Image (spheres, rainbow, N blue to C red):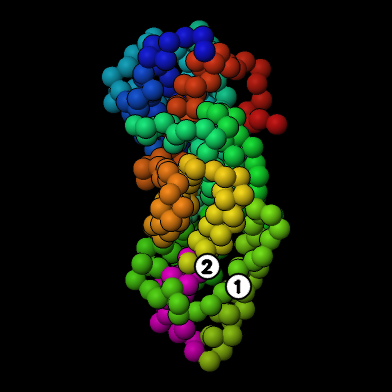
Amino acid sequence: MTQKQDTVTILAIESSCDDTAAAVIKDSKILANIVASQTLHSEYGGVIPELAGRAHQQYILPVVQQALQKADINLNDLDAIAYTRGPGLMGSLLVGSHFAKGLAIALNKPTIGIHHLEAHVAAHYLQDQLPEFPFLCLLVSGGHTQILLVKDFLNMEIIGSTKDDAAGEAFDKTAKMLGLPYPGGPLVDQLAELGNANAFSFPKSKMEAYDYSFSGLKTSLLYFLKKQKETDPNFIESRLNDICASMRSTIVESLLSQFEKAAIDLNIKTVGIAGGVSANKLLRKEFEKMAQKHQWRSMIPAFEYCTDNAAMIAIAGHYKFINNELGSLNDLPFAR
Ligand code: KG4
Ligand code: ZN
């Protein structure tokens, strides 16, 4: 570590998908965390990359200005500018990385490129109590589902992952088949709270080791709905909450059974969840229950740090900065 931790002030920018976000971190404490979510995609049933890139261009300046104002930080007080360096949509990443680099040139400050998935895990370092390493993290987002063995702040190894759809995708596609708007995950979660999880039974995939698969579940819902609608055209409307509850519990059970197996095999005592799907109410509840059963320490990020945000980029940037892992203006907008 090259510098004392409490002297670092970083502006962070996140623009990997459809949220334009900026945060300011000082002394490893978040001073501002602003997110502008692009609602324009909902009418298309999914994120339109070209529109997302254009919307980031519109939002980025006001979002950064708001973050600096809320943090009461002057641009000259910054030590570095961190930005999401993939994975994500190319047009969206370009806006954040170019904005960060432009500002860095103007201020003569360094940039720090942050891996979006590592940042989701780094959301755990925003908690008052830091985790003990190694810990096992279930990373569940719209594009990824992984079990990560986290050995140090930003040093992690993938020990399991989905072979097809991500958990977030499974929720979003469920919503789409049920005629709900994008992004459907939060809505399916909300409706599931009112339904009976045992109403319908859907298949859970059986994968090798610690991997996942959700594409079969999606197909089974498709055929199930088709069959039910043949006898009752109003089936979806009349049983919406029960379908959501049954699908949600199938996805959550699949996520946890592989994760539990991995944690036991690796003799892990600290476990966490991260990424957009970690906002899911049932997953949070069942994860906590599983940890209690095994007397594991469980880490569940605050809601605002689960879905895409710049606070997680800021804390990852903080640890990279104190390790002197700075970026270059020649860095590509995405990590290889
Ligand atoms: O991490 P994130 O914000 O973006 C990516 O990096 O992909 O995750 C977004 C995903 C979407 O698929 C969204 O539907 C899902 O997280 N999500 C949820 C919930 N909140 C967000 N899925 C289930 N239950 C929720 N409460
Ligand atoms: Zn994300």
Mark 1 residue crowding within 10 angstroms, few (<14) / some (14–19) / many (20+): some
Residue in front for this viewpoint, 257 or 254: 257
Pointer 2 residue: 250
Residue in front for this viewpoint, 115 or 226: 115
Residue 207 shows in this picture: yes
Q: How many marks?
A: 2
Q: Quadrant of residue 7?
A: top left
Q: Amino acid at mark 2?
A: Thr
Task: Please name the residue shown 60% across and 73% down the image.
Answer: 203
Figure quadrant of the C terminus? top right
Q: Where does the image place residue 42, in percent across and percent down from the top left?
A: 47, 56
Q: Are marks 1 and 2 in contact (CB under 8 Å)?
A: yes
Residue in front for this viewpoint, 173 or 278: 278
Q: Where does the image place residue 256, in percent across and percent down from the top left?
A: 53, 57
Label at residue 131 = none
Q: Quadrant of residue 34?
A: top left
Mark 2 residue crowding within 10 angstroms, few (<14) / some (14–19) / many (20+): many
First along the sequence among labels 1 and 2 = 1
Residue 247 belongs to magenta span = yes
Task: Please name the residue shown 52% across and 67% down the image.
Answer: 250
Find the distance from the CA under tag 1 to the CA under tag 2.
8 Å
Task: Judge left or right: residue 79 versus residue 65.
Answer: right
Residue 195 belongs to magenta span = no
Mark 2 vs ligand 1: CB below 8 Å: no
Task: Judge left or right: residue 190 versus residue 50.
Answer: left
Label 2: element kind: helix
200 w.r.t. 290: above or below: below
Report the span colored magenta.
232-248
Task: Please name the residue shown 55% across and 13% down the image.
Answer: 324
Residue 144 shows in this picture: no
Pointer 1 residue: 203
